[in-house]
Amino acid sequence: MDNFLLDWVLPGCRVAGITALILLLLAMIAGGLLLAHFALTLPMRRAERARVFLDLLESTLHQGRPLEETLISLAHSRDLSMGVRFHLLAAWLESGLSLEEALSRVPRFLPPQVSAMLRAGRQLGDLLKVLPASRKLLSDAISQTRGAMNYLLVVTFVITPTGFSVFGLLSIFVIPKFMEVFASMGVKSGTGLLYFLAGNMHTIILIQCLFLVALWIAVFLYVGGPRVVGWLPVLERWQYLLPWRRRRLQRDFSHVLALLLDGGVPEAEAVRLAAECAANSVFRRRADRALAALRQGTSLPEAVQAMDDSGEFRWRLRNAAATHGGFLHALKGWHESLDARAFQLEQAATHTLTTALVIWSGVFVGSITVAVFMIFTSLINSAVLW
């Protein structure tokens, strides 16, 4: 009986335990990958949901059907492709609210800029005119910047944590052993880098931890989207400081302002609605200064000078007012230029940050490699002298 336990039962238990451990590890890895996929694709899924809703609005308006009634009937079909908040929106519509009032009751169904553009379209009297600008806002070079974002995410979650882990393990298990060997042998030449790393180990690890936490916070803000901005309004100021974000805000403001002016909306009301479409507190404060200037009798091109520090918007708006093709047609080239410059700046910033992070991780790994080779060189020299 004892031989049977030793020869069959115990090895079988060990194999089963190792297999269970491997399966548990694989399940944890798979769960982590699924969670990461869900979190990282959340902004794109939000944009896709908004695009489907805009397509639904466009088809309904082209067919001449009542907008609110169509949305309510679609919700009654129990189609879950639009998400739970669409059914909540339909419930508010069914209670007698208009579309813009229902959107204000469900603020997380659409991005704030899109909701504001739809309200501006209702003010203009034609939702179809604001749908192209809304789609442009949702598709700000997503397909083009996806590659750069993937590189940044790989650096954030793979390269940087790996370098941090390698340096931490070497600092805990390898470097102290080498120092003990050198101390026992009395070897001091070629060990300066090793002693520097050992003496500043905690500082280096702290710097890497701070970098890693900063990167993860940035990814959290990217995933959280408008909800996080609602929690932390100060982020709107930071977004305005980003040059590519600021140019897209200018593009959206100018586009909606041109639509409203061409539609005959009074200048003051057009500036107010266009600033709401930007959904940024800095832009709204600047719009308030422009409105105050308009009330004092200042012309529109001079009043909107507060919206653009460079003065280019004032110059283009003055030229657009002098043409006969309408503001939107006259400003089309500037909108395309703002979009192109925003894409270029965002790409440059992403690649610069990715390269800097790779170099930063390489410095630590390279320093460990150089230190190890210097250790081996010192050992060989000591062995030859001995």
Image (tube, rainbow, N blue to C red):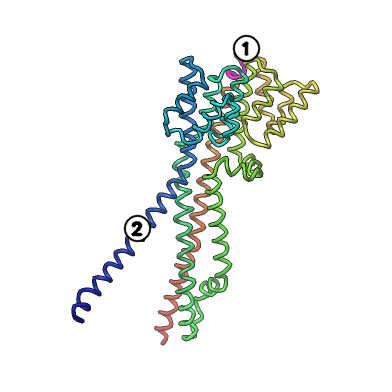
Rendered residue at 38%/56% (across/down): 29
Q: Is residue 328 magenta?
A: yes
User: Residue 156's x, y, as percent?
Assistant: 49, 53
User: How would you rate the neighbour count of disc 1 (Cα within 10 Å): few for under 14, some for 14-19, many for 20 or more?
Assistant: few
Closer to the camera in the image, 138 or 327 = 138
User: How would you rate the neighbour count of disc 2 (Cα within 10 Å): few for under 14, some for 14-19, many for 20 or more?
Assistant: few
Closer to the camera in the image, 2 or 366 = 2
Please name the amino acid that badge 1 sits on.
Answer: His
Q: Which residue is mark 2?
A: 26
Rendered residue at 40%/83% (across/down): 383
Q: Earlier in the sequence, mark 2 or mark 1?
A: 2
Query: Alpha-carbon distance for marks 2 and 1?
Result: 66 Å
User: Residue 248's x, y, as percent?
Assistant: 58, 33
Q: Is residue 107 magenta?
A: no
Please name the amino acid that badge 2 sits on.
Answer: Leu
Instruction: Please report the bounds of the magenta region as a residue range.
Output: 326-330
Quick check: can you spot residue 334? no
> Which image quadrant is residue 297 in?
top right
The dominant secondary structure in magenta is helix
Q: Is residue 80 above or below residue 67?
A: below
> Which image quadrant is residue 375 in?
bottom left
User: Residue 369's x, y, as percent?
Assistant: 44, 67
Q: Residue 324: which disc?
A: 1
Q: Is residue 362 above or below residue 148?
A: below
Q: Is residue 334 above or below residue 194?
A: above
> Which image quadrant is residue 19 in?
bottom left
Q: Describe residue 349's horizontal placement relative to residue 384 as left or right.
A: right
Closer to the camera in the image, 217 or 354 = 217
User: Residue 124's x, y, as percent?
Assistant: 61, 18
